[in-house]
Image: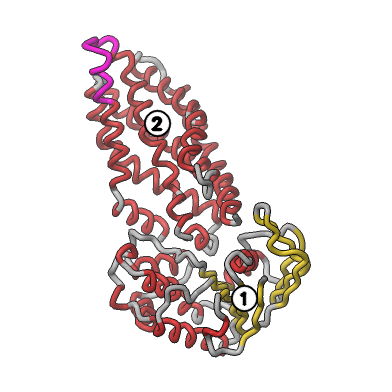
Amino acid sequence: MLVYRDLKIYSRSLSDFLNTIAFMITIVVLFPLAIGPSQEKLNFLANAVLWIALIISVIPTLDKIYVNDFKNGWLEQLNYSPIFLEIILLIKCLTFWFSLMFPILLVLPILSLFLGINLNLILWNLLIFLIGSLGICLIGSICASLTLGTKTGNVISPLLILPLTIPVLIFGISSCEALKANMDPYPNLYLLVSFCLILIILSPILSAISVRIALGK
Amino acid sequence: MINLKNIQVTRGAKQIFNDYNLTFISPGLNVIEGKNGSGKTTLIKMIAGFLKPNKGEITNKPNFTSHEWTQSHIYISSKNSLSNELSVMENIKTWVGIRGWVTSENEVEDNMKKIGIFAHKDFFISQCSEGIKRKTDLCKLFFSFKNKIKFWLLDEPTNNLDKEGRKKLEELLNKFISKKGTIIMSSHDNKIFKIKHKLIKLI
């Protein structure tokens, strides 16, 4: 019921997600124009551009995981579920991640080709982006819950999220670059997966603590 | 029975309650009256468990665990916990689902007819007036009788309600009290219902 509700809401308020995709496309399209006609430069920077475009376009939307439900009082009602609040918040975060990433993953292959990434690397890149984006959403869940009820939440939340996404950025880009250089991507990929697994446990616990504090204000 | 013993609550720089003691009647209707900022919402949120007092304790008899207490009451805030992107029917069904209760489309429709919002069942909440939104929130109370709910915590339930809505709410309150339910309700006007009640005045 929780997944059904959230998916219905996101499908009826698509403009936020479409803005994210539009922003990502804009960054990726403008970048080759900015650096000039150098295939070598583009090859060198392609993965970095995609990751930075992903992080910059996703971060502003992350506070929407909880803010509307907090303002309309729905988060209070979630306390009355027989399911633990931690699990509910994890489900909310995963539903948000799916709604956000599904359209992004549809355009990612096209953007990869636009930046000159090899066709045979695109599927691998998609997998690494999928894992990395999950990490970003879980970090976003913690930071969004911390800033609930504050007046400047939508300004502070991105500033909190940005430094915490650096491990995701480093491990994600390193995996993609290793693939491109025909080296073993698994060490960095395993680090990325481990980071995300730790977040899957920590994120709902920390988010639930912050939500309870926010509801008591 | 719910008791407040030596409660002290400070919100920001303001002390709302200082060494406050109170016993609510149970079963029955308890009406908390007070001007804006006197602490009506704070008191109800404390009883609901969202807010812990700085000092003092809230006890209930029989002794509920935190989980038992949550499952034994319905809390209706002044905010209308409704999503603008969902219809009236969808909001009610998702709330019932989140509570872990089983219901049918027919039961939801019957309850909507009782409170007078059936004609709006497929309207998005964003398209509804404040009165319809309030009635949608109050429709949740009809699910109490089947699901062993013993307490209602209502924060200004009569806001935006028309005369017919207040009449239906009064009938609902009477029905719940007749089934040995306990209601703790905040209101600006304790004379709004002709039901015997304990009046708690906050300064």
What amino acid type should be assigned to the residue bearing mark 2?
Answer: Ile
Which residue, given by chain and number where applicable, does mark 2 sit on? A55
Task: Give the quadrant of residue A181.
Answer: top left
Main SS of residues in magenta: helix
Q: Which residues are magenta?
A: A28-41
Residue ID at (37%, 22%): A176
What amino acid type should be assigned to the residue bearing mark 1?
Answer: Ile
Read off the chain for label 2. A
Q: Which mark is residue B79?
A: none
Query: Residue B127: in sight, yes or no?
Result: yes
Task: Give the quadrant of residue A186.
Answer: top left
Which residue, given by chain and number where applicable, does mark 1 sit on? B32
Left/right placement of residue A119 relative to residue B167 reads left
* Picture mark count: 2
Provide the secondary structure element on which disc 1 rests: strand
Residue ID at (33%, 59%): B85
Local packing at callout 1 (Cα closer than 10 Å; few below 14, some 14-19, many 20+) is: many
On whether residue B180 falls in the magenta region, the answer is no
Provide the secondary structure element on which disc 2 rests: helix
Read off the chain for label 1. B
Task: Give the quadrant of residue B71.
Answer: bottom right
- Residue B130, image x and y in percent? 38, 69
Q: Quadrant of the N terminus of chain A?
A: bottom left
Q: Report the front residue among B6 and B181.
A: B6
- Residue B45, image x and y in percent? 60, 64
Question: Separation of disc 1 and disc 2 at Cα?
Answer: 49 Å
On whether residue A37 falls in the magenta region, the answer is yes
